[in-house]
Image: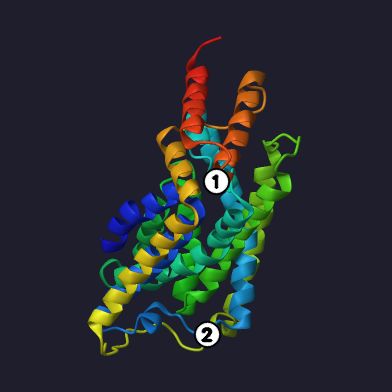
Amino acid sequence: MLTGFLFITLGVASQLVNIAFGLWFAEVFVFFGAPYLVMRLSGYDAFRTAGVSRPWLAGAAFGLAIGVINFFALVVPLQVLSQALAPKALVELFDVSGIFKQQTPVELFGVVTGVCLAAPFCEEFFFRGLMQRGAVATLGTRRAVIVTAIVFSAFHLDPVGFLARVELGIVFGILAVRSGSIWPGVFAHLANNSVSVAIYFATRGSEVDDELPAWAPVAMLVVGVALLFALARLALGVPSILTPPFRAEDTARKLKSVPNLLIGWALAGLIAVAALVTVDGPGVRLNLVDALNPLKEPKKGEREGWRQSWDALYALRKEVRSGSAKLNEYEAARKAAIADRKTPK
């Protein structure tokens, strides 16, 4: 409950003011920091309870392999199916590639590392390490894995990608159950996100049609599922692959200084926000203007004048960021561009 409340409030708000900062803030302070704090205040060793043992080579390699193969075997076909069934406007509204656009090099680095490093560890710590383990006692293992996967997907606030993320959550959940550690799931999560990001950058600006041929998802499904079964048989035949240094267990740990832990968590969050506003005030204000005046980048084949207007608006945005133009000029230009989009021609 606490994590959900913090995500909907602080997590979403932080991503509106700066997506790179918001990603790291949501992962570190919401999905990792808050649950860790609650576990410690409840008298538990948060790391041992969540199964945060030392990473081991076989488990890491197995998780990476599962993540890559599963991405092509099931995530891509499910995403293609969801996009085909969903209204076009909804698909465009929840186009997650937008987080990589209009970012400075530093912000882009923050977004990529947030997606590929912070999210895999922090989300697996909370969802599989704590939530799923807690749900097993009341729901049983299978239901706990499925329910946690559904909640995990819902937290991403993306109806188009909901089905694919539920499948991902089930895969990560099974890895956590079989190994008694979050690390195989962390590496599978890392591989999934990294492959997705790599494909985006590899195809960005490409003139190749974005749509896959109809046979491609089917071929990926057939070949990928066969490979997944082969990996599963390998893990069953060689149990040491998913044998961590220690398995997740509820371990009591006395907390000597409750006030210091609470104050430290809150103070670290406040310092992070203050640092963002101090270092990048213009960027924060620009992002707020963008959030209050939503405008999608023109797609291929749309009116040429819209593309020119978008390019001019983006150039003006960079000038505001550098201090050579005023924010109110950009806000007025953005509103004018929105009005132009709404005017039938």
Disc marking residue 78 = 1
Give, as a three-letter code, the residue at label 2. Answer: Arg
In the rendered image, the quadrant that contains the N terminus is: bottom left
Mark 2–mark 1 contact, CB under 8 Å? no
Disc marking residue 4 = none
Query: Which class describes the residues within 10 Å of circle 2: few (<14), some (14-19), or many (20+)?
Result: few
Q: Quadrant of residue 135?
A: bottom left
Q: Quadrant of residue 193?
A: bottom right
The spot of residue 20 in percent (x, y) is 51, 55
The spot of residue 101 in percent (x, y) is 59, 44
Q: What residue is at 63 percent from the left and 35 percent from the top? A: 315
Q: What residue is at 66 percent from the left and 62 percent from the top? A: 227
Give, as a three-letter code, the residue at label 1. Answer: Leu
Single out the mark in the foreground, 2 or 1.
Answer: 2
Measure the alpha-carbon separation of dots 2 and 1.
Answer: 33 Å
The spot of residue 17 in percent (x, y) is 43, 48
Q: Is residue 52 visible?
A: yes
Give above or below for 168 relative to 57: above
Give above or below for 268 relative to 279: below
Instruction: State the residue in front, 4 or 147.
Output: 4
Disc marking residue 54 = 2
Instruction: State the residue in front, 230 or 87.
Output: 87
